[in-house]
Image (cartoon, rainbow, N blue to C red):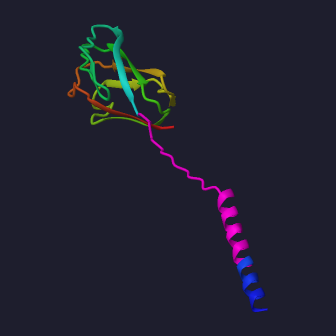
Amino acid sequence: MKNKKYLLIFILLLAISIMAIGYASFATSISIMGTATINGEWDVRITNIETIQTTGKASPGEPTFSNTTINFNAELYEPGDEIKYKITIANLGNINAKLDDVLFMSKETDEECPITFETSEIAKTLNVDEETSFTITIKFKDNVEQMPEITTKSITGFISYVQN
């Protein structure tokens, strides 16, 4: 009887060992490895400024630009003088952009100085590889009858595009 117990225990241990070996041979480990890289490139910039119209004796000067700034020194001589500049903005990156904010401001009011600045509408979206243009018009008001005390008006403008 004692031998039967040992034989039964041995058979059970042998069966468990065979089952463990069988399970191990049919079990598979799966490894998952990966890398994520951000390859977004933000590159919305000014690509050109050109004078498209002058009226009267107005002189557009030599406007200059860099990727994010424009400088111009327009000279207006008499009422009705006007200059229009065309500014081109391009999206040279690989992320679509949308217009977030447009702000143009001046220390001098229209009442203090008869020079006005106006801009045309600026594109609300600028997708990859697209460009858009808008105009800035600088004008010496028509209805001025005498030379004003303030003869210079400076503007500062901000056009903000963000990720779309």
Horizontally, residue 86 falls left or right of residue 122, namely left
Residue 4's place in the image compared with 115, above or below, is below
Residue 155's place in the image compared with 136, above or below, is below
- Residue 70 position, x and y percent, is 29, 25
Q: Give me the residue at 76% from left, 82% from top.
A: 8
Q: Is residue 57 magenta?
A: no
Q: Give me the residue at 52% from left, 49% from top.
A: 33
Q: Is residue 83 visible?
A: no
In the image, which residues are magenta?
Answer: 12-41
Q: Is residue 1 visible?
A: yes
In the displayed orientation, state which residue is furthest to the left: 149
* Quarter holding residue 119: top left
- Residue 64 position, x and y percent, is 26, 19
* Quarter holding residue 42: top left
* Near-viewer residue (105 or 146): 105
Q: Is residue 13 magenta?
A: yes
* Near-viewer residue (102 or 142): 102
Horizontally, residue 88 falls left or right of residue 71, namely right
